[in-house]
Amino acid sequence: MEESSLINLHLRNHIDYAETSLVPFATPFPTNETVEFIFRFELDREQATRIDPDPSAFPGRLVFSGKRCDEDGEQQASEKVRLPKGNYAFMQKRRELDRTECVNMAIELQKDALWERFSLENIMYLRYLFEDGSPVVQFLRPYSEEER
């Protein structure tokens, strides 16, 4: 079953990734459960808080990409990037998505989060992983708990 409802995710520990030069929407999805990819985007500040954002502003400017392997994997990079611990508005789909589907999902997440009065930051994380026998695409938008 595909999930698409907004979830309030409290990530209790950060997740480190080896920095890469991967490109979203061109990078193949992981095909096993020991690898995942992350992409961090910076959204236009005005568009990041609109209930009716311009789709051309998404996914935003790519800040970094990373690859994570399990503890037995070969990841030993000197440069690391991080998904910080904290509060996130979260959605996921249990299948591969193309760029248009990702943009639509990112906008849906933003609309639902704003409707729920999340005070979203202008950052979006996009994660590609493989879980329970299928690819998964996750969208995470940090928010400030004090302002909610």
Image (cartoon, rainbow, N blue to C red):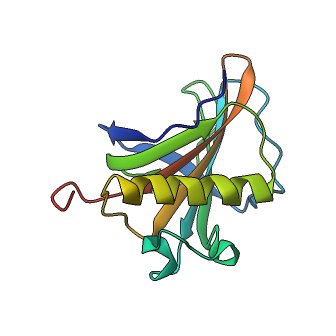
Residue 51 in percent (x, y) is at: 48, 68
Q: Which residue is nearer to you in this view: 144 or 85? A: 144
Left or right side of 69 for 86:
left
Residue 73 in percent (x, y) is at: 64, 30
Give the farthest residue toward the top: 132
Left or right side of 24 for 125:
left
What's the residue at 38%, 56% (across, down)?
Answer: 115
What's the residue at 59%, 38% (across, down)?
Answer: 92
Residue 86 in percent (x, y) is at: 30, 48
Residue 58 is drawn in which quadrant? bottom right
Answer whether residue 140 is visible to the viewer in this image.
yes
Q: Which residue is nearer to you in this view: 69 or 110? A: 110
The answer to whether 120 is drawn above or below residue 33 in the figure is: below
Instruction: Please give the count of numbered marks on the rendered protein.
Output: 0
Answer whether residue 80 is visible to the viewer in this image.
no
Left or right side of 66 for 124:
left
